Image (cartoon, helix red, strand yellow):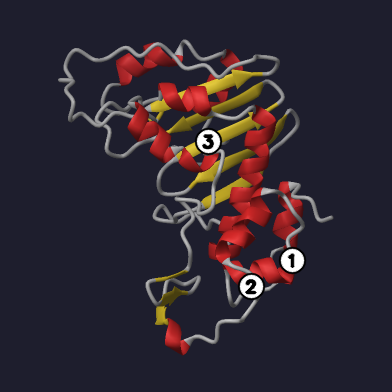
Amino acid sequence: MYLAVKEAPNPSDLFDRARALAVISMIRWGCYSGDSDWTGYCMAQRGEGWKATLRLGYHGVDIHFTDAGVVAAWLLHESRFSSVEYPEEWRSILTQIPGPFRALLNDKDTTIGLRIEKDIPELNGVMWRSAGDTAWRMPEIIHPEALEWDENTSDAFKDEDATDLLSDYIDRVLDKPQWCPSIVEEGVFEDPLGERIPISEVALPITGMTEVEAIRQVLALRPVTEQIVRTLHPTRTLAEVLDFLDSTGYPRK
């Protein structure tokens, strides 16, 4: 967690990365449909004073971009130190978060990725950066006395756990997003309905572009072309993703 706070990009760069990840996920897997097992990124536009929320599907990460700044919260499933298991400790931790961000995390209508339990958001990691601030912040962690801490304890505040979960957001060089996997791997094509088809039975287009090249183009916010779309998803067309591109504010030119 401490390393994630140190390595996270500034809010403007993070928003650009968020839009790119949402576009890559949309091309590969389509838009989020509410399925709790859905893996990938989706971006929802919000109201006045609130630019957008990026969600990482099954893994449970919400990043809210607002006029007040940016707040990120997540749920690392392997961690035993969650707000559900230790609500009193987390109520104390959450009081350290600036009011506008705390209100977002506690509102069921504004939290698309993390379920609300026991009147507090279900999470075990959070960081924020207020507008005009020069660094990301995290709360002081209050460990529950009932939880035995040792080197084998999986905890969302340990560097190796949080940075792995947030790697797509904070890695300066990103060729293959970890949390929006390719639909073509190990000789199998997986269609949007989850059907796994042998590559030999799929007429894959020859685009003249590698998957890594296509991803780099999107991460750089270059205009999405038919070539990029076909490289990331052999059976999807540019026309199918244009409305989504516009909804995220992704540049068309």
Helix, strand or loop at label 1? It is loop
Q: Secondary structure at mark 2?
A: helix
Per the model, the C-alpha gap separating discs 3 and 2 is 27 Å
**Where 82 falls versus 241 (above or below)?**
above
- Give the numbered dot on residue 112: none
Judge whether 124 appears above or below 53 on screen.
above
Circle 3 crowding by C-alpha within 10 Å: few under 14, some 14–19, many from 20: many
- Residue 62 visible from this viewpoint: yes
Whether residue 120 is visible to the viewer of this picture, yes or no, is no
Point out residue 120 in the picture as x, y percentages from the top left corner.
41, 25
Please provide percent x and percent y for residue 150.
16, 22
Give the Cα separation between the discs numbered 3 and 1.
Answer: 26 Å
Q: Which mark is residue 170?
A: 3
> For the residue marked with disc 2, what is the amino acid?
Arg
Residue 164 lies in quadrant: top left
Name above or below for residue 18 compared with residue 253: above
> Pointer 1: what residue?
225
Q: Earlier in the sequence, mark 2 or mark 1?
A: 1
Q: Amino acid at mark 1?
A: Thr
